[in-house]
Image: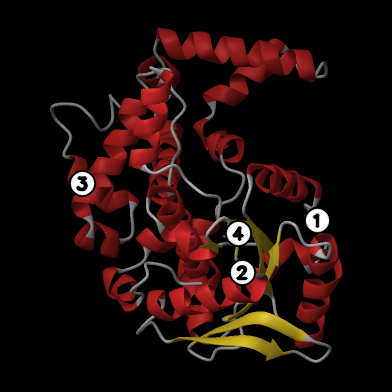
Amino acid sequence: MELEVFNDETDIGDIIEELLPKYLYREQYLKCVKKFEDIFHWTEDQFFHEMDAFHELLLYKFLGYMACIQKDISDFKDIYFNVKGHKLIEAAAWMDLEEDGESTLQECKDLYYEVFCYPDLLFEDTDFLLLGSLYNNRYLGDTSIEYFAGINIDYYFELLPLDIQEHYKTKHITLTSVISDMLQYLDERMKYGSLYKLFWEGDDPVKEDRVQLILENIMDAYFYNQEIEITREAQLGNGRVDFKLYKNKQEDEKILIELKRASSSYLKKGYEQQLTNYMKSSNYKNAFYLIACFTDQEYEKTVQFIRNHIYTDTVQLYINIKILDCRKRNTASQLHKTEHLII
């Protein structure tokens, strides 16, 4: 990157225009530059950095760009790989040799000198290349590719044209991500605000039906004017589910939410049987299993429950288990009193 992009002669805009779709260059040029700089500067430190969809697309396209250059330059290895690069390749080749005794050291090294091979080595998937088709199919009501391939189109939201992004006020395309965002908001208000007080009556936690009522009102306010409908205690064939949410009345945008207190004797049954049966009988694709915790012991129990209930069958794979952390928090005045007693 230093030789090809970040030098005194190259116009980074020319590189970006060649690598990325025209709409990204036209609408989000400054972000493109920032993401490019991120990737370059991250190579200069020893920290693990988390790439987003923009970084992934840029890196993938840049590798393809460099692979094309490599075809035309016979001494590419001497020009673009410095001493540090040679040492890293040497170390990686020795590691590969230990794992695969069939190849020679030179064959292992040659692999790392072929830029064409880098995308296969670095990327588990390249779903971002399908973004146009994924969005257009979804617009026409077909989300089958997303569903069967397990693609979360929301991850690529920032790569969409701006006019499409502006259409989604929540910055999410799927209702699943919208609800996850809402639950994250509740968690923050519980931890750093006083929202948890609604779930207590004096020293006693409220009953489960009261928790449902509070959640219903919170969701009504949170989803106001977002074309999301909420139905409480909806009848679904063989029983009632706590909440059923719709988005724009689209079949693929319907989600179930089942709530249980962590102290409930039906906690396991509610997940393994009740909610699973609801999804099967109603043909719903996604659901949330919300567990309300009121004590540290209940919280720890729920964390363990989540660890022990990670399934990969076609139904439970799409059930999101979330914690509604209703534990009491120490207020600033209580903390001050505690500190005073300690002193």
Q: Is residue 109 above or below residue 184?
A: above
Q: Residue furthest left?
A: 8
Q: Residue 320 in the image: x percent, y percent?
A: 66, 61
Marks 2 and 1 in Cβ contact (< 8 Å): no
Amino acid type, callout 1: Tyr
Q: In which quarter of the image is residue 117?
A: top right
Residue position for label 1: 311
Instruction: Indicate which disc, 3 or 1, sits on the residue closer to the N terminus.
Output: 3
Left or right side of 314 for 334:
left
Give the Cα distance between marks 2 and 1.
19 Å
Indicate the secondary structure of the residue bearing disc 3: helix
Q: First in sequence: mark 4 or mark 2?
A: 2
User: Mark 2 sits on what residue?
Assistant: 146
**Side of 229 where 306 appears, left or right:** right
Indicate which disc, 3 or 2, sits on the residue closer to the N terminus: 3
Q: Which of 300 and 339 is in front in this view?
A: 339
Q: Earlier in the sequence, mark 3 or mark 4?
A: 3
Alpha carbon distance from label 4 to label 2: 44 Å
Indicate which label's residue lies in the foreground, 3 or 1: 1
Crowd class of label 1 (few under 14; some 14 to 19; many from 20; radius 10 Å)? few
Disc 3 marks which amino acid? Asp
Amino acid at the residue labelled 4 = Asp
Instruction: Using the rendered image of the protein, determine whether residue 283 is visible from the camera's viewpoint.
Output: no
Label 4 Cα crowd, 10 Å radius (few <14 / some 14-19 / many 20+): few
Asked whether the viewer can see residue 25, the reply is yes
SS assignment at label 4: strand
282 vs 188: above or below: below
Name the residue rendered at 42%, 29% in the picture.
Answer: 338
Q: What amino acid type is highlighted by mark number 2?
A: Glu
Residue 139 screen position, x and y as percent: 48, 83
Q: In 3D space, how far apart are the residues under numbered discs 3 and 4 (Cα atoms)?
A: 64 Å
